Image: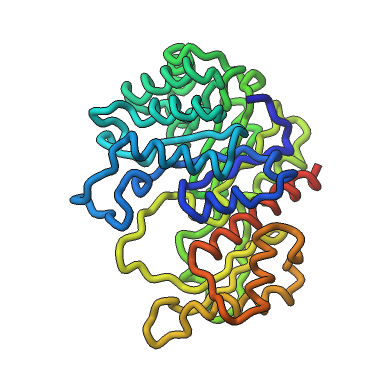
Amino acid sequence: MMRYNTKHYVPILRWKEAERNALATLYEKDSYCLTPLFEIIPENIIKKGKLSKQDAMLDLEVATNKVIEQLVKCWGPRPFFIDLLWLTTDMLKQRTGSFLEMLSQCAGIYNLCLIPVTGLSRDGPYQSSVQKVLSVHRQGACLRLTSDDLKNPEFTKNIDTTLKALKLTPDMVDILIDFRIFDQSASTYKTLCSHIPHIESWRNFIVASGAFPEDLSKCPKNDQSKLDRSDWIYWKNQVTADETLARTPIFSDYTIQHAKYIKKGKGWHFSASIRYTSGDYWLIMRGEDAIRKDGPGFAQWPANAILLCDLPEYCTETFSAGDKYIKEMSMQRKETGNPATWLEAGINHHMTFVVRQIANLF
């Protein structure tokens, strides 16, 4: 892992099919301009189709092999961050061992560049697993901090204590300030820089937040809407206007997903909508309930794709794999796609768009 310049990008992605495929189909020149942070979620170690509390989990060895196989296929030897913050204690460790340690050992066999993510409030067993991972991979770690961490009067002491426990120095650590849901009143980057100890020494300084809403209920059905990319605007305005920053943060977001992980239950309803990143806003083409028996169903996606391809926001089919998919779906009537394929197209387009947007900004 190296120190990146301000043109780099860190998308935060849950380990799901759409996100994995969106990464796998990035054009090579774009993929080398970002380092993803993967959030392993409960669904990754639950038997397929069984999400209730009563359902048995996969054996951690089986879950490890599954995740590593997917990593090899979609990302390969390039560096990535991996965080298990959404997993419960019984998911993190079973009789066979620690999930993080097992992932690390298996990743080493395939020469994957795994960088563990931890925080100031992770418990002892988790920090112990991170220590063991560091001894194997020697790729350093990512320290993911929250707004609550920043407000703690013992903030600096907690950072130094964590570094000491992990036997790391700041130059071996990527510090990620994650505000989660975007808040206009959050600390400015100038204030952040003055508040964070060792600001110039961290390997990489990253700031993340997510402005995409939890759902599209505020967007009218069968219409086009624009939602401000407030997370991007906030970052762009500060890094281009303030030349006195002690350190310019790397941009990080949650792509076209809500910042907070919410497990969807059985019987979940959704609209056939397209989420398309453009400039300082997201273009939303919201349809109706896709699974309502008397509704227009999945055919709404190709219909909206036809409309999108005629809009000035559309970047043409050569821009990204996601844009190519949108164009191809607009030119046929046999296939409709599904929620995962359209989300994949939107995330792939978003990551490509952000990488080039950042490059053009500087």
**Which of these two is toward me, 71 or 224?**
71
Q: Residue at x 22, y 50 (%)?
A: 55
**Which of these two is toward me, 201 or 241?**
201
Q: Pick the quarter of the image with the C terminus.
A: top right
Q: Residue at x 38, y 46 (%)?
A: 44
Q: Position of residue 264 (x, y in %)?
A: 35, 59
**Which of these two is toward me, 107 or 226?**
107
Q: Position of residue 242 (x, y in %)?
A: 75, 37
- Left or right of 261 on screen, residue 344: right
Say how many tags the image has.
0
**Which of these two is toward me, 47 or 271?**
47
Q: Residue at x 58, y 79 (%)?
A: 223
Residue 127 in the image: above or below residue 49: above
Picture quadrant where residue 73 is located: top right
Q: Position of residue 356 (x, y in %)?
A: 75, 49
Picture quadrant where residue 331 is located: bottom right
Residue 34 in the image: above or below residue 247: below
Q: Position of residue 4 (x, y in %)?
A: 70, 30
- Left or right of 328 on screen, residue 36: left
Q: Pick the quarter of the image with the N terminus.
A: top right
Picture quadrant where residue 248 is located: top right
In this view, the residue farthest toward the bottom is 294
